[in-house]
Image: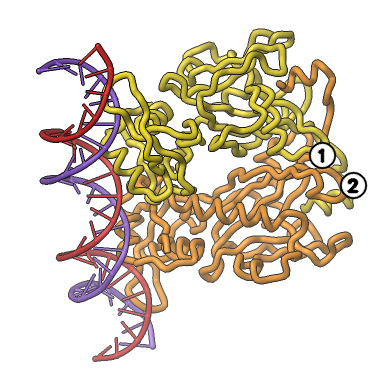
Chain colours: A yellow, B orange, C purple, D red
Amino acid sequence: MTEEAQASRGIVVGSNGAVAVDVVILTIRNGRLSVLLVERGLPPYKGRWALPGGFVLPNEDLDEAALRELAEETGLSQLPPGAHLEQLKTYGTPDRDPRMRVFSVAYVGLLPDLPMPVGGSDAAAARYWTIEDIKESDPSLLVFDHAAILADGVERARAKLEYTPLATAFCEESFTLSELRRVYEGTWGVSLNAANFRRKVLSTPGFAIPTGRTTVSAAGRPPQLYRRGDASLLHPAMLRPSS
Amino acid sequence: MTEEAQASRGIVVGSNGAVAVDVVILTIRNGRLSVLLVERGLPPYKGRWALPGGFVLPNEDLDEAALRELAEETGLSQLPPGAHLEQLKTYGTPDRDPRMRVFSVAYVGLLPDLPMPVGGSDAAAARYWTIEDIKESDPSLLVFDHAAILADGVERARAKLEYTPLATAFCEESFTLSELRRVYEGTWGVSLNAANFRRKVLSTPGFAIPTGRTTVSAAGRPPQLYRRGDASLLHPAMLRPSS
DNA sequence: GGAATAGTGTCTTTTAGACATTATCAA
DNA sequence: TTGATAATGTCTAAAAGACACTATTCC
């Protein structure tokens, strides 16, 4: 039955729940895939952690709401250049929030490892957790179904690195190929052959563009710097080792 | 800000819109990718077409609501074996429905080309349209943002055929490799080399399993019959011709 | 020079594209 | 036999994996 048919029959008119957004903000810190979580400072659920999120405001688009939540928690007034935010999935199991029916439209954000701002808009604590640490901790660390949302977000990021150049969203505006490779290695939890990785990236038009500059490094030959190209798909894909 | 923080501050409590599901039901008819649309029989929007959909009921999960809508429009009491239904994306632009704020959680369904049942639960007409015909018709054929939802659904289907064995969801329980190839050809709008396609499918474990039986065909050598295997990913992917 | 990291070259293996050839049916 | 479709075989090209080797820096 169509929405309109229902509405004209008066079966369900008006609202059947509240709509929120939750954001899985991922970054690579110290070579490990990590997510930004906020701690509940007040009951209920005091001491447990949650994905940043909140209700969609009247007249606010979903993407806007997600951007706003990301900005509030990271302190970034806007997305850094090259960063990426995309819709993930909507979660609406009737009792996922025990207080009322809440539909949560989840987003995934890929960001470079920026220094945390001094306090977001909330009093509650916020910090990055490695995905590993969360998996090894008490299953009730996260509120509601946020563990499932996080798992879906991580899988989305892992999959998208295969067939898009989005790994660069984890990097600063200019980056070395070793940094880019460590994004893949940290996200997939594998190690990749540096020479073959280099050949693959450089043979894909629009993935990484040489800037001509180099960086100073602590030891070894100074690496070249690259910037994001305009490719939107890798063809053929970067293969995730199957082992 | 977290949902809980907002709720405890009373910033937004209760609802901010209604939540509906809309389903992009795709099939291959006469070799062409096609979608099931329902016609509005009553004003407003009389004579225009829409994706099957409706509001999510209290205590109904999103997947359930999508299955219910699919069943109501196709007359299928349950999904045929091997058919596929997955969440696509949520659309929530404030004025996408002029009557009230409606968040629509869209789904994509891939089904074999089953005969249409004699009338769904609605009085409104329902029929399959080819994607081509919709693209060539008046842009106002579809209500609201349903053209955009349809485009996203078609792109999802096209992409998923590349890296999953979901093409089999368009087939009956047993199928020939030519039928399977025509699914790819119809979905992608290309023609594929039959010999190379065959080699690719048969070299992917769990894609298509020979049943040992053959079909009678109007002309030519009778083809072997296959059934779906248990693979969930193609590795490496079936490449979509880049031309 | 030695340690460390960046970058190049090359051989092998896997997979895809092109396409000729054979197989099996109906009329 | 002819026409049609299914199935096989083979050569070539593209891409990935493995890995040895050279380059450039700091100490």
The C terminus of chain A lies in which quarter of the figure? top left
**Does residue A149 lie above or below B66 as drawn?**
above
Which residue corresponds to mark 2?
A10
Choose between C13 and A199: the one closer to the eye: A199
Residue A162's quadrant in the figure? top left
Chain ID for label 2? A
Q: Residue at x 54, y 71 (%)?
A: B30
Q: Residue at x 74, y 40 (%)?
A: A61
Q: Check contact, mark 2 vs mark 1: CB within 8 A.
A: no
Q: Residue at x 60, y 51 (%)?
A: B109
Please give left or right for residue B119 compared with residue B158 in the image: right
Can residue B136 be seen here?
yes
Residue B157 % position (x, y):
54, 53
Residues at marks 2 and 1 on the same chain: yes
Choose between A165 and B32: the one closer to the eye: A165
Q: Nearer the viewer, mark 2 or mark 1?
A: 1
Q: Secondary structure at mark 2?
A: loop
**Does residue B155 lie above or below A210 as drawn?**
below
Choose between A223 and A177: the one closer to the eye: A223
**Does residue B18 lie above or below B130 as drawn?**
above
Residue type highlighted by circle 1:
Asn
Q: Secondary structure at mark 1?
A: loop
Chain ID for label 1? A
Residue A39 % position (x, y):
64, 13
Residue A5 % position (x, y):
83, 54
Give the CA separation, mark 2 to mark 1: 24 Å
Residue type highlighted by circle 2:
Gly
**Does residue C20 lie above or below B204 as drawn?**
below
Which residue corresponds to mark 1?
A59
Residue A234 % position (x, y):
42, 48
